[in-house]
Amino acid sequence: MSKQHQALIIGASRGIGLGLSQELHHRGWAVSATRRQSVGADTYPAITWLTLDINNEQQSTAFGQLLQPGQYDVILINAGVQGPERQSASSATPEELLSLFMTNTFSPIRLANLVLDAVKPGTGILAFTSSKLASLNENTQADMPLYSASKSALNMLTRALLPETDSRGLTLLSLHPGWVQTDMGGAQAPLTVEESVKGLANVLESYQGKGGHHFVDYTSTPLTW
């Protein structure tokens, strides 16, 4: 029998992160996942719950030190926010802009460097939840410009990890989960969480050992940068 795959999902209190944690568990993976608070973790006892606020530097550093080298086949950093309701740089406050980019861009990359050793060398995947909106080619109308800009910046800083991940034989993924019926996506979104996470799980299973950096959606369709 092959050894059980292990995944760590960062940001899994609800929505896509929680749904993907459950989907991977149903597929036989051992799943660890993080929330900012431990309240309610006993609702999903099959998942190993860890507490982490990615914007807390001390917590992130301590979290990285707890992980074992080569422990996970997949680490997905999913934590993110939509940002200000008015998606305009002239309307948003400096505090709102800083919060958006810290949560969606800088904190995920800082955390990635702290957990990189825990990704299994050779076949492991380090993945980030990005968005199709991050692409100038895919998002020609600049929809949700502040949110989109934070994800574009995340894509660029993810690409900057490539020399290090290549040296370890890892695969980098920037994932678009689709427009999903979550608190962020809204009830009008065409995809259910279940549809999105089944696709994302397929992507994670199929990209093990491929190497490089790939920007794909939940159907494995490549996206233009």
Image: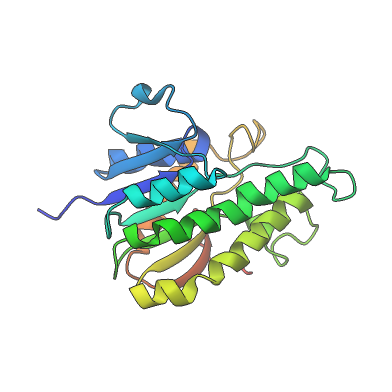
Q: Is any part of residue 175 visible from this angle?
A: no
Chosen colour scheme: rainbow
Locate the C terminus and report the quarter of the image it occupies: bottom right
Front position in the image: 112 or 87: 112
Report x, y in % for residue 8.
36, 47
From what the image shows, is residue 135 above or below residue 169?
above
Judge left or right: residue 110 versus residue 67: right
- Quadrant of the image occupied by residue 29: top left
- Quadrant of the image occupied by residue 121: bottom left
Report x, y in % for residue 194.
45, 37
Report x, y in % for residue 11.
49, 41
Front position in the image: 26 or 51: 51
Q: Residue furthest left?
A: 1
Q: Residue furthest front?
A: 58
Front position in the image: 111 or 173: 111
What's the residue at 37%, 77% (across, down)? 167
Report x, y in % for residue 119.
33, 60
Q: Is any part of residue 96 visible from this angle?
A: yes
What's the residue at 89%, 44% (across, down)? 91
Judge left or right: residue 1 versus residue 189: left
Q: Residue furthest right?
A: 90
From what the image shows, is residue 42 above or below residue 165?
above
From what the image shows, is residue 13 above or below residue 11?
above
Judge left or right: residue 36 versus residue 85: left
What's the residue at 34%, 27% (across, down)? 44
